[in-house]
């Protein structure tokens, strides 16, 4: 497997199905995106499992020789609170899908102050031009 080797085997070595979960405080009405890369185990087995982020989820089935590919889950919470990003690998054979490059980003629901200033400046220019036209 090429790369830096600093990724997570989602089945670990516990002989149980792998589970990795982390909770985050998310704000209502803001769109959040969880992005991550998954690859096959490269040890001869097809891996399957589920990833959930708030109310969003996806199921994966990855052949052993599959290289890392990017995945995205998008979620907009209805209420502010703690929401989990969870990776659940099926099985329990100590060979799991490989996980790397996990990130959570958001799209701001409220315009930044600079956007407001630019909008007001534009309205002022339009108002002055229409006043001069009269």
Image (cartoon, rainbow, N blue to C red):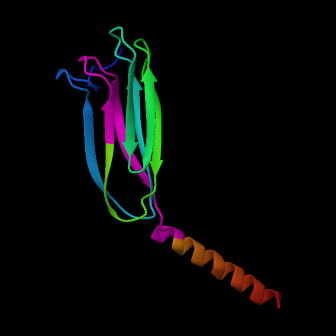
- Indicate left or right for 15 with 112 as reference: left
Count the labels in the image: 0
- Indicate left or right for 96 with 131 as reference: left
- Indicate left or right for 118 with 70 as reference: right
Where does residue 117 sit, x and y in percent of width and height?
Answer: 52, 74
Q: Nearer the viewer, residue 62 or 7?
A: 62
Q: Which residues are magenta?
A: 86-115
Where does residue 119 sit, x and y in percent of width and height?
Answer: 59, 73
Tell which residue pokes out farthest to the right in this image.
Answer: 134
Q: Residue at x 52, y 73 (%)?
A: 116
Check the image and report above or below for 5 versus 54. above
- Indicate left or right for 126 with 56 as reference: right
Q: Nearer the viewer, residue 99 or 114?
A: 99
Q: Residue at x 44, y 23 (%)?
A: 61
Instruction: Give the image quarter of residue 49.
Output: top left
Q: Residue at x 30, y 22 (%)?
A: 91
**Residue 98, magenta (yes or no):** yes
Check the image and report above or below for 65 versus 47. above
Q: Nearer the viewer, residue 130 or 79?
A: 79
């Amino acid at each position: 497997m090429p790369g830096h080797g600093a990724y997570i085997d989602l089945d670990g070595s516990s002989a149980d199905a792998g589970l990795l979960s982390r909770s985050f405080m998310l704000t209502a009405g803001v769109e959040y995106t969880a992005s991550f890369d998954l690859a096959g185990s490269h040890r001869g087995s097809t891996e399957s499992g589920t990833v959930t982020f708030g109310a969003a989820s996806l199921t994966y089935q990855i052949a052993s020789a599959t290289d890392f590919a990017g995945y995205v889950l998008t979620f907009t919470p209805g209420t502010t609170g703690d929401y989990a990003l969870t990776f659940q690998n099926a099985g329990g054979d100590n060979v799991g899908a490989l996980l790397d490059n996990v990130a959570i980003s958001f799209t701001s629901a409220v315009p930044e102050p600079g956007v407001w200033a630019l909008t007001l400046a534009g309205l002022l220019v339009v108002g002055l031009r229409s006043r001069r036209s009269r």
